[in-house]
Image: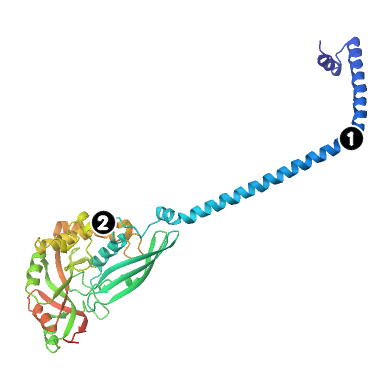
């Protein structure tokens, strides 16, 4: 039996008298050895304490050095991370949020140029977007400068805007829709406070008023038709006139329904040419299809603008106005696919004589003059 087993029996009071004597004898030896060792510790105490203190100081110095190294490493890592974030901030920001500096469609133009040009041509008869200049301000923020050209005066206007983490806030003057009552049959009859349905001057009254005006005036007027024309009828009319055909309003809903803003297209081929966009949306650019009959080109041009808007409705949803433009164009596309592309009126630019000439057409109900310029020859 081992001493451990004997000691266990001794503690449990199960050991025999002989076993008890054996354990007690061993314990006596242990006590004697303990006293001896304690005497040796007292003799070595001064030497041991000095050694222990020196060892503790070494450990303390080592821990302090390690702490300083850890702090230094943490500072370096933080600086590297901040430097990387600063250096790659533009790339990171453009991955997370909408980037108005994308050039996926045209090498020398931003995509936002085309997005805004389409919105403006479809819904803003009197202006044209020339360019949009974005300036990055960091972490999903951009300043925008929008250049608009007024069709009547030819003057340019710069308007401000911002992009903040995907949301586009444009100056409210950037949305220059026409009034809903500038055409006699553009929408469901609009009644103002005086009970009048429109601001249109009937043809007979308009001709009388124009007769006394000097011919060096250049006028801008909305022309209302008494019935809807096909694009072929519009082309035939334009070929017989001497003035300039501008924006053409398109019937986008039944006449007894109100749908605003009005929609249409620019009948000319002015402005920048986005040839790459035209490849993706044929007839987006009228000037690239001069071999096609004009009426057909107009119709396909309008449909191209609608399809473009539908395909990029995620962009229009970011705007502070017209953010439902894409979904509205989807409804308009369905309507004109079933009913054809027809017009109830258009913008026209000409002298008083040229205005009187167009009023001779029996389908013209009247005009609404919105602007005029004095253009004296030689001045």
Front position in the image: 84 or 322:
84
Q: Is residue 14 above or below residue 133?
A: above
* In this rendering, position of residue 343 left or right of residue 110: left
Q: Is residue 14 above or below residue 319?
A: above
Q: Secondary structure at mark 2?
A: helix
Q: Residues within 10 Å of mark 1 (few under 14, many from 20)?
A: few
Instruction: Locate residue 208, reporting x and y percent.
Output: 11, 86
Residue 208 in view: yes
* In this rendering, position of residue 342 left or right of residue 308: left
Instruction: Locate residue 255, reporting x and y percent.
Output: 18, 66
User: Which quadrant holds the N terminus?
Assistant: top right
Name which of mark 2 and mark 1 comes first in the sequence.
1
Query: What residue is at 81 percent from the left and 16 percent from the top?
Result: 4
User: Which quadrant holds the C terminus?
Assistant: bottom left
* In this rendering, position of residue 6 left or right of residue 179: right
- Marking on residue 45: 1
Q: Secondary structure at mark 1?
A: helix
Front position in the image: 162 or 263:
162
Query: What residue is at 16 percent from the left and 78 percent from the top?
Result: 367
Label 1 near label 2: C-beta < 8 Å?
no
Instruction: Locate residue 340, reporting x and y percent.
Output: 13, 60
Query: What residue is at 40 percent from the left and 55 percent from the top?
Result: 94
Front position in the image: 325 or 198:
325
Query: What residue is at 9 percent from the left and 73 percent from the top?
Result: 363
Q: Quadrant of residue 198?
A: bottom left
Residue 258 in view: no
Between marks 2 and 1, how big is the CA–CA gap? 91 Å
* In this rendering, position of residue 271 left or right of residue 208: right
* 2 or 1: mark nearer the eye: 1
* Colour approach in the figure: rainbow
**Residue at which label 2 appears:** 310
């Amino acid at each position: 039996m081992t001493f451990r087993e004997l000691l266990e029996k001794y503690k449990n009071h199960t050991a025999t008298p002989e076993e008890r004597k054996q354990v007690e004898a061993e314990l006596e030896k242990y006590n004697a050895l303990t006293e001896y060792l304690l005497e040796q510790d007292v003799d070595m105490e001064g030497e041991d304490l000095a050694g222990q203190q020196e060892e503790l100081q070494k450990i303390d110095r080592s821990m302090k050095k390690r702490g300083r190294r850890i702090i230094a490493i943490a500072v370096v890592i933080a600086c590297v991370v901040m430097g990387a974030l600063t250096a790659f901030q533009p790339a990171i920001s453009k991955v997370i949020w909408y980037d108005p500096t994308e050039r996926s469609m045209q090498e020398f133009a931003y995509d936002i140029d085309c997005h805004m040009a389409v919105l403006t041509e479809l819904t803003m008869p009197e202006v044209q977007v020339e360019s949009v200049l974005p300036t990055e301000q960091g972490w999903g923020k951009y300043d925008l400068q929008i250049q608009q050209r007024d069709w009547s005066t030819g003057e340019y206007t710069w308007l401000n805007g911002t992009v903040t983490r995907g949301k586009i806030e444009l100056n409210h003057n950037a949305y220059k829709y026409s009034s809903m009552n500038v055409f006699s049959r553009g929408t469901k009859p609009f009644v103002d406070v005086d009970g009048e349905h429109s601001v249109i001057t009937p043809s007979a009254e308009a001709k009388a008023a124009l007769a006394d005006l000097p011919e060096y005036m250049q006028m801008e007027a909305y022309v209302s038709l008494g019935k809807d024309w096909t694009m072929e009828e519009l082309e035939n009319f334009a070929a017989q006139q001497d003035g300039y055909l501008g924006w053409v309003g398109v019937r986008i809903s039944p006449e007894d329904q109100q749908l605003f803003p009005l929609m249409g297209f620019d009948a000319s081929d002015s402005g920048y040419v986005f040839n790459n966009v035209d490849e993706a949306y044929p007839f987006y650019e009228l000037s690239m299809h001069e071999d096609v009959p004009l009426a057909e080109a107009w119709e396909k041009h309008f449909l191209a603008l609608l399809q473009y808007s539908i395909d990029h409705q995620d962009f229009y949803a970011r705007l502070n106005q017209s953010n439902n433009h894409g979904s509205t164009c989807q409804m308009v596309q369905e309507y004109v696919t079933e009913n054809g592309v027809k017009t109830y009126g258009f913008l026209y630019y000409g002298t008083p004589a040229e205005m009187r000439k167009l009023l001779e057409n029996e389908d013209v109900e009247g005009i609404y003059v919105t602007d005029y310029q004095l253009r004296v020859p030689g001045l």
